[in-house]
Amino acid sequence: MSSPPGSTRGRSGSQGGSPQRSPRPSSPAIETSGQVGVYAGGESGDSTLKKGSGGLSKFAIRDDINKRCDLPPEAYVRENQYKHQFAKRPAHNETGQAVTIELNQFRVVAISNPDIQQYDISIGDRPEKPIVYEKVWNSKALQDLLKNKFPAHEFLYDNRALAWSTAKTREERIMVDLDAEQGRRSKGTNIFRVTIRHATRIRLDSLRAYLQGKMAWDNSVLECMSFLDHVLRQGPSERFKLMKRVLVNNNSESEPLSNSVEAIKGIYSTIRLNQSIGQGGIGLGVNVDVSNQAFWKGQKFTELIRNHLMDTNSRSWGRIQVGNLAQVLRAVRDNAGNLHMSEAFKALRRLHKIRFEVTHRADGKVYSVKCFHFNAKLGNGGDATNVTFKKKMQDGTEKVYTVAQYYKEAYNQRLQHPELPLIETPRGAFFPIELCEVRRFNPYPFKLSPEQTSTMIKFAVKRPRERKVQIVNMITNLNWAGDKYLKHFGIKINPQMQKVTARLLPAPKIEFEKKKTVAPQLAGRWDLRGCRFIRGNREPLKSWAFVVLDGCVDKSTVENFAKVFANVYKGHGGNIMGPPVVYGYQPGARIGTVVHESYQSCRAHFKADPQIIFYIMSSKTTHVYEELKKHADCRYAFVSQMVQGAQVKKAQPQYCSNVAMKVNAKLGGQTCRIDGKGFYTKPTMVIGVDVSHASPGSASPSIAAMCVSMDKDTAVYNAAVQTNGWRTEILTPVNTESMLKPLVMKWKDQFQILPDHIIYFRDGVSEGQFSHVIEYELSEMRNVFMKLGAGIPNYKPKFTVIIAGKRHHIRFFPSGNQDGDRNSNPFPGTLVDREVTHPFHYDFYLCSHVAIQGTARPVHYNVIHDEIGYKPEDLQKMIYHQCYQYCRSTTPVSLHPAVYYAHLAGARARAHDPTRGNEGTGLMAKGGSTVASSQRNDENCPRLLVLGDPGQASSRSVANFNSSMWWV
């Protein structure tokens, strides 16, 4: 029998032995056969209550705390894992000029209570909804018990399974009746037995010992961090909405990004370990920063659907009104007469998991969307007029209702739009859309559109002075000095930004052909005029073409641009034998045909495989770009260069110079190198790896990219790319070997030896994955080298593994004008290896670039494994200086080029995904992926298309392509 409207199935936190809870009806929950829903996942993860001495297991705590707190890498190493000793800092860098900067990390200066009591909290039969825990804990009965028995003590509760206090008791028990608490007649079905049982004592001395390097990380240290994280958040969470590490409220600054999405400026706050012991601190700090996030707008659900459709496809649904929503959402029939979801209905899949309230009751209860109900058997897909359920009456009979009839009888609500689809919740309840209102602060989890991104950038980007003011205001709002929980537990935080002495590393001189050098110094940029690339294209350019798409420019304009480009490229050392051939295509031409015909025509014209073809585009259209690259790369293996029609018309030498840097790298040349004595003392290879993941909601697999240096300057790289499962960050063993082995063999053929030193830069991994990089990726890499070096006596290469991370909230604010640039950003080369770094791990922050806009974000480098043993000043200088060797820029880049190139190669390889473009609108929903989620594993993940179809590309073209920097 179907359950009554809005009821919950199964036990939900009732007292042991008491009847099953049966809340009053609210909306129909039915069970029908053959129904189809636009599913969008179940309820968000409710963690399970853990009992027993010591509270939660360390793994259960970690799964919760790591979303809110920065933990060191050893905190994530499970007991059955390989234990790796992460590299320790050998020394500080004392080279370069001393500069003073302020950091947005605030010192914890005192914790006066050395011991805290931790309690296990047991509530009934483990309620499924978080709100039940909160209501029970905040009930008058429970709070009166605690205040009467422990009047001088505060209790801190994590809203799930743990509590902390300075009070000590063995066990407390109480029954809480939520009906009675809310003034309702108690039915005995909403009563919860609460048990507060002493679990352990939080020994803050354990944390101090770890910070001083006197003991290893263990569960006692983790418990200290969990307590400190909760006490730091408790006060603000009573005034703000807590979203993991970010606090927002209705007073937070916001900006509409579209009709359905808004940006909100929140307060990012997290406690971190640091290196302040012995320098006035206790080894802890609070990182506070601005956090700009996208949210669905709070509004009536009907308005959200209308606005979402307008944002999704303004051409089709740009003028839609609430009154005709049902028309576009109504099911459609195919040629065979079968009923299907309309395109507009499919677009509703993005609204999964949105939290909402109902307007026909003022109880404030929050629901979430599982799907929008669809049943092909109902003729129109289903709505409030034809979805029915049975309700058991008081006399024992059953009555059949439609949803519309039930709301009229139970709530005197005559639906204005009964023809609209129904919302289905994870617990099986159905609600008419018009009676639902979307709560504010529903995270928008999808990739922003170009227009939304542009608006977000304008809203988020702030110069350092403005950002600093915002952070200072946020500290005022956090009100640490007046926080009763911090006071009670004796925790004091300095509200002033911490000043630290940074090192300004000297910029390198950049060498071009004939030993000509330029010295950027503090400017962080240089001019290419008068400079010839240190090595031009590998072979003279004689077989090349320009192809005009959509008739965006005429032939004479193209010929003029080609002439200007050729002169500029020759001036930089490019070797060009003759002019290109020009082809044109009108709008509507198929991209595959364009690439095929232009390739064959160019090949016939010059009687040689095309070396490069320029495609002139009218606009920056992603799918056209990817189609062009896919056919050029994967069918014929020739390098291509996209240029904008507007730039072709201008034919400016500076633009041509920028294009020439990219073309030269694609044709086997080298832009520049760092002047002076080389960094390496032994044959050295640099490897960069990045694994990129599809945007939220996409069914595309993850893409692994590996770049390996191919010259003694480590300025020229070759790359390999491949799919890496779905959202799998660590390289699979198969990929590690299949990608690395050919690149190492190519390196060996070029140098006639194997490298003695390998520096491995890894991008995109969090502290929780550091051990995996060593245990799996490094281990597989070592196997590849040892197999290839099996015939070399005593061959055992040394590795240094460095994680490069940009997903952090540490910012540098130069104290004086002399310590930063004109925008108050740090100068390129600003290094911080104190205060915000780990107490003893080998990490540092380096700002190597000039921020074009906003506040510069330094890169956080973690040396997690160091067999080579470079001096810190030498390693840091190498990383900084090589940022000037990035092949397509006249400024240093923010990230070491090895991982920067890997990121570019992975992004380009998206075009090589054979499933690309087959996803439709089924994002994060049933039917929304090309491979069913139950079938997704690394074994059946589709592989990328090969570079150069053996039946269409010559072997010489494939070899040249793979030896080029085709991804830049």
Image (cartoon, helix red, strand yellow):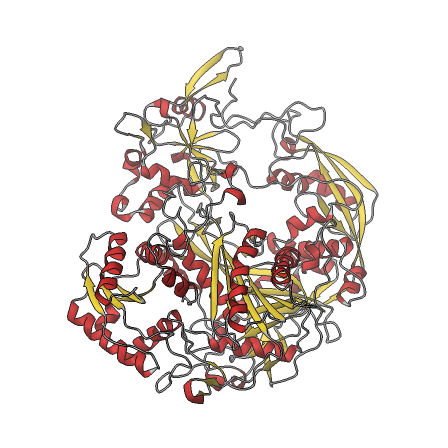
Q: Is residue 934 left or right of residue 486?
A: left
Q: Quadrant of the C terminus?
A: bottom left
Residue 118 is situated, as x and y percent measured from the top left of the image, at 77, 49
Residue 656 is situated, as x and y percent measured from the top left of the image, at 30, 76
The image quadrant of residue 161 is top right
Q: Is residue 3 above or below residue 621?
A: above
Residue at 84 percent across and 43 percent down: it is 170
Residue 193 is situated, as x and y percent measured from the top left of the image, at 72, 33
Residue 905 visible in the snapshot: yes
Q: Which sits in the foreground, 280 or 543?
A: 543
Q: Is residue 712 above or below residue 259?
A: below
How many numbered discs? Answer: 0
Residue 442 is situated, as x and y percent measured from the top left of the image, at 48, 47
Q: Is residue 255 left or right of residue 59?
A: left
Residue 652 visible in the snapshot: no
Q: Is residue 423 left or right of residue 247?
A: left
The image quadrant of residue 801 is bottom right
Q: Is residue 682 above or below residue 902?
A: below
